[in-house]
């Protein structure tokens, strides 16, 4: 981690209120994502993974600390400036694809460019669809595509503006394992071919093994990381973070 990180979190704290109760979701997180890196965020349920992604993307405000995108402090920007910055420099991929049902695959991929007021070059959209293996499917609506194909459209859409960083929240959570592997290989390929930066939250050790690095969270803190992870190595770390989930422990 250094000053060249695309995204940096420094001393980030975030506490939610549930009635009179304070729920600390992030409890002093220092983390950087280097250009061209693919990072998986893992941890037990409630450990703060989604909150970390939301804060890193400026979708949620931090209580303490700083979030920097290419050195620009997100926490100091107005909502309007944040929205514009997200449109231009961030891509998002979700578990449930979040495509617009009434639009074709091509129109879905074009959407971030249109929202950002950028001219749409049909050749660029063709290339984007071809890159995700959907050159022939541009005119199909989401309902006419399989789950894996829909997620490929979502990846092409996330990359349309050539963003600095793509945030993926459980991108394979709704896919069968063979399709999930294809989508993950595609994501890793994108990182390697275009030097894109991807930050992915996942529960799945196999999904995490496609990343260059896995960061483990527990109780809102970073508890460790694995570089060039294997699925087995990740599963072992997760078992240590989730006592009682392995089945061997007495009830
Ligand atoms: N909007 C909210 N209001 C109140 N508490 C919240 C809110 N969002 C998250 N929390 C709490 O903050 C903590 C961290 O939640 P978060 O969703 O970031 O965890 P997570 O690791 O993504 O969990 P999961 O794997 O179950 O999705 C949890 O205790 C959660 O209940």
Image (spheres, grey):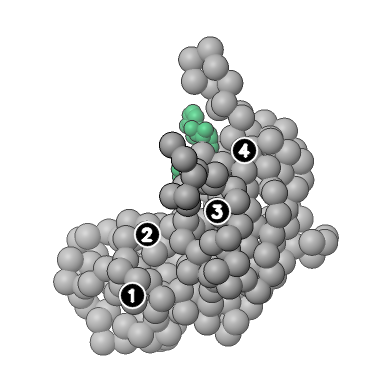
Q: Position of residue 160 (x, y in %)?
A: 46, 71
Give the residue at x 82% y 60%.
3
Q: Which mark is residue 251?
A: none
Q: Which mark is residue 173?
A: 2
Residue 100 picture quarter? bottom left
Front disc: 2 or 4: 4
Graded by Cα atoms within 10 Å as few (under 14), some (14 to 19) or many (20 or more), the crowding at tag 2 reads some
Q: Would residue 23 be found to the left or right of residue 225 on screen?
A: left
Dot 2 falls on a residue whose secondary structure is loop
Q: Tell which circle, 2 or 4, labels the residue nearer the N-terminal end.
A: 2
Alpha-carbon span between mark 2 and mark 4: 22 Å
Q: Quadrant of the C terminus?
A: top left
Q: Earlier in the sequence, mark 1 or mark 4?
A: 1
Circle 1 sits in a helix, a strand or a loop, which is it?
A: helix
- Sequence order check, earlier mark of 4 and 3: 4
Q: Alpha-carbon neighbours of circle 4 within 10 Å: few (<14), some, or many (≥20)?
A: some
Which label belongs to residue 219? 4
Asked whether the viewer can see residue 191, the reply is: yes
Label 1 – label 4 distance at C-alpha: 32 Å
């Amino acid at each position: 981690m250094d000053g060249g990180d695309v995204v940096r979190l420094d001393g980030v704290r975030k506490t939610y209120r549930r009635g009179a109760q304070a729920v600390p979701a992030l409890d002093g997180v220092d983390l950087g994502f280097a250009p061209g890196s693919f990072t998986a965020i893992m941890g037990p349920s409630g450990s703060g993974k989604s909150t970390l992604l939301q804060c890193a993307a400026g979708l949620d405000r931090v209580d303490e600390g700083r979030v920097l995108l290419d050195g620009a402090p997100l926490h100091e920007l107005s909502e309007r400036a944040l929205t514009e910055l997200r449109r231009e420099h961030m891509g998002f991929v979700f578990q449930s694809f979040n495509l617009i049902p009434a639009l074709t695959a091509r129109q879905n991929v074009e959407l971030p460019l249109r929202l950002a007021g950028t001219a749409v070059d049909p050749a660029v959209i063709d290339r984007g669809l071809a890159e995700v293996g959907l050159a022939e499917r541009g005119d199909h609506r989401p309902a006419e595509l399989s789950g894996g194909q829909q997620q490929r459209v979502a990846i092409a859409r996330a990359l349309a503006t050539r963003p600095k960083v793509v945030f993926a929240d459980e991108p394979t959570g709704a896919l069968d394992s063979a399709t999930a592997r294809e989508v993950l290989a595609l994501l890793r390929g994108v990182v390697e071919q275009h030097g894109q930066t991807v930050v992915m939250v996942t529960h799945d050790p196999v999904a995490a093994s496609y990343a260059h690095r896995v960061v483990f969270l527990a109780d809102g803190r970073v508890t460790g990381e694995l570089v060039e992870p294997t699925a087995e190595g990740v599963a072992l770390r997760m078992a240590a973070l989730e006592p009682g989930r392995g089945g061997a422990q007495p009830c």
